[in-house]
Image (cartoon, helix red, strand yellow):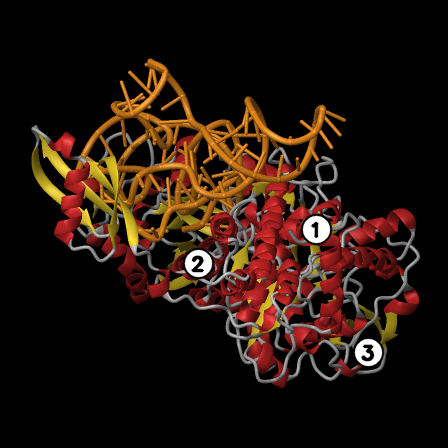
Amino acid sequence: MSAPYNHIEIESKWRKRWEENPVNVNDGKKPKYYCLDMFPYPSGAGLHVGHWRGYVISDVWARYKMMDGGHYVIHPMGWDAFGLPAENYAIQTGQHPSVSTEANIRNIKRQIDQIGAIRDWDMELNTTDPAFYRWTQWIFVQMFKKGLAYEKEMPLNWCPHCKAVLANEEVADGKCERCGSETTKKNLRQWMLKITAYADRLLEGLDGLEWPEKVKKMQTDWIGRSYGAEVLFPVEGTDEKINVYTTRPDTLFGATFMVLAPEHELVSKITAPEQKEAVEAYCAMAAAKSSVDRVQNKEKTGVFTGTYAINPMNGEKVPVWLSDYVLADYGTGAIMCVPAHDDRDFAFAKKFDLPIIQVIAKDGIEIEDMQEAYTEASGTMINSGEWNGMESSVLKEEAPAIIEKKGIGKKTVNYKLRDWVFSRQRYWGEPIPIIHCPECGAVPVPEEQLPVLLPDVESYQPTDTGESPLAAIDEWVNTTCPCCGRPAKRETNTMPQWAGSSWYFLRYVDVHNDKELVSREKADYYLPVDMYIGGVEHAVLHLLYSRFYTKFLHDIGAVDFDEPFRRLFNQGMILGPKGVKMSKSLGNVVSPDDMVRDYGCDSLRIYELFIGPPQQDSAWDERGIDGVNRFLNKFWNVASESIEKNVAPNPEMIRLRHKLISDITMRLDQFALNTAVSKFMEYNNQMQKMVQEYGGVDLETIGTYVTLLAPFAPHLAEELWERLGHTDSVFHEAWPVADEELAADEVVEIPVQLNGKTKAVISVSVNAARDDVLEAGRKAVADRLAGMTVIKEILVPGKIINFVIRK
RNA sequence: GCCGGCGUGUCGGAAUUGGCAGACGAGACAGACUCAAAAUCUGUUAUCCGCAAGGAUGUGUGGGUUCGAUCCCCACCGCCGGCACCA
């Protein structure tokens, strides 16, 4: 028996070898494969076993791609280092955020190195590096020049805790996505990015992506495209017209009242004098409502304006109301209300005793005393003048065109997606490269003057007023206009956390380029990303923003593709031992460091995969790693024994070899990494029996096993590969290919069932004739067939025999 | 409320997608080695009845399709996630 497996010695040996002699090198001839991890925020807590799992998954994939197809794999890592925690730490300690960030990066880099992954550290980047954010600012300037970055004053989501505005994507349930505080609305002048200009392309581009359907669905819903019509309702006694958006123009005859958002611009113009006071009071109340109230309290409120409008379809007078259930920033901020066919309108009509007219009847029957709205689109039109008798689902499609023809409105498309609020009132972010000149307005900083460096401040403390801490640095703020040379002021807001991450993946491949964002030559060879691995929490944030940025950079000719990530894999979270999210405050964070020391990197790698399906959340259970560790030790022994004995192959071993190749490859391709590990264990158990029976397993089979195991346990594999007598790295081996004929069993066991219940199992040759197999089946259950009538005999070759019998 | 996903031993999970349910691992129990423990090895381990051979039940619940259902269809229950007054 040779020496036992010593993970410390072997892992440090190969770590050193790989450093001296990297296995993943670009010779300029290989096809490329870009396998990317979502880059981490360098938090002070370091990596826990959950982060580790994501990086293990991506490394297994990267190494597999390196061997399968002989790719040069781009597998870089960087730091998404702007953001609030570093800034908050700076507020507490007075230490510059870059200092704590740098220390955190050192620690996390050490932890990442423990994974033993192939990494292109010469591509490392950091979003807070001026050489990087120069180009983040450059992209902003290009967007500004194309009219996609603009300033606007509007009510915005404001987080009183973070003291910054938030994008819609950063607010969930009326609360700040980051800190959980209730958000309020604040009227502020902010920089916006016109992501809505790309709504259709962002929607349509999803079709060609190999992404989880769930994420595509989330983005589709977030963009929220709907088709309908805008219809003009003249206001009685004035020249004004109220423009409403509806997806159900077929129900126009059923519109018995209208509702405007309290913020609608016509409110003050059309309110009747006797209702003025009530309307003003209602608007004030609506403005004071918090986002949480608005989302959670769905009890309808409203006020009558005292004014009537005319339904343009039938000339009927309809009262105009105000209510905050109509959103000012969706559609036209005004709706026509059809209480018979919309739940919200129904509730409003019931509360304020407004008329309800049914215009769609299921099977032509009108409902007496309606108790709830009939919201289905199928039925026959009634009470609808010229439309009576039509099928409503047909009319729904045709109505926008009819309305347009009549000159009372037009066909339209609407989106839920809003423009992206892009400025933040905080210190630790990229300065927005704009100069405000009293004469020339907002002027971009000339490209050759980029980057606009983030200056040092005395206080990082954010303000309550919506002003950035940068505003206090007069010598930085005061500058001259690049256009006219007169005194001007710098923009003091910074960019949101998402700015750098929206395009960083493009920069890795040309990280030192100081002439352009990325050279066309390098972009054409290395990009886009072939596989992107990370958590699902960025579905409508980072992943949507990145797609928008890439489409924009495509349009200005910076890159020749317009989707950044061809394939996306969302790994599940590792939860704490009790199944709750790991967090510092709960004290259930498990660090990989001790386990790497005690069990070795390869054991932890495999355990991270074995714990459950990679896309699924799994609770951490530290005991499980023992099983994986035992498996690696056993395999080490099987391999060592076999190397010593060098036995000749037999058909059983050859069959095992080809079955293993086929099983492992299939599972890798399906991303079923947990069952790939099970299969390794299963085959290892079989090989152990062969060692007992034949003294060892033939070295070709051992070599194949080692090759297949290499992406999972790279150190152990390299060591055994060397012990098998090879001088080159196992990672330069081509991925083995199974010979299905050699993998096929000669004899198969098939169950024999009576009425679907297994009563016996027979062994038959795979080539046996149908009748012989059936005969063998009959024999196996002969005693049970006695006195029975066989009604039907079912034989699925190689699978099953089933006799349907009756007394 | 709407849209997804899931529900299998004590636990994590598997089942080549309609063909022996519970692979693989953890845990537990028993045994071997040991003065002893750890490590290692060898068994057993879905439930119920039975000394046993064997039999019955069993993939959230109820029904259906099928020779055969964890898998397909219908209804329901429970958990998780997303969206949420989007006209």
In the image, A458: left or right of A672? right
Reading the image, the residue beneath label 2 is A653
**A318 on left or right of A467:** left
| N-terminal-most mark, 2 or 3 | 3
* Residue at x 50% of width, y 46% of height: A326
Residue A387 position in % (x across, y down)? 21, 53
Is circle 2 on the same chain as circle 1?
yes
Q: Residue at x 12, y 51 (%)?
A: A771
Q: Nearer the viewer, residue A483 or A445?
A: A445
Nearer to the camera, A210 or A401: A210
Q: Which mark is residue A160?
A: none
Q: Amino acid at mark 1?
A: Gly
Q: Amino acid at mark 2?
A: Met
- Is label 1 in a helix, a strand or a loop? loop
* Along the viewing direction, whichever of A728 and A420 lies nearer the viewer: A728
**Which residue in the protein does label 3 denote?**
A481
Disc 3: CA contacts within 10 A as few (<14), some (14-19) or many (>=20): many
Which quadrant of the view contains residue A443?
bottom right
Contact check, label 3 and label 1, Cβ < 8 Å: no
Mark toward the start of the polypeptide (2 vs 1):
1
Q: Residues within 10 Å of mark 1 (few under 14, many from 20)?
A: many
Residue at which label 1 appears: A600
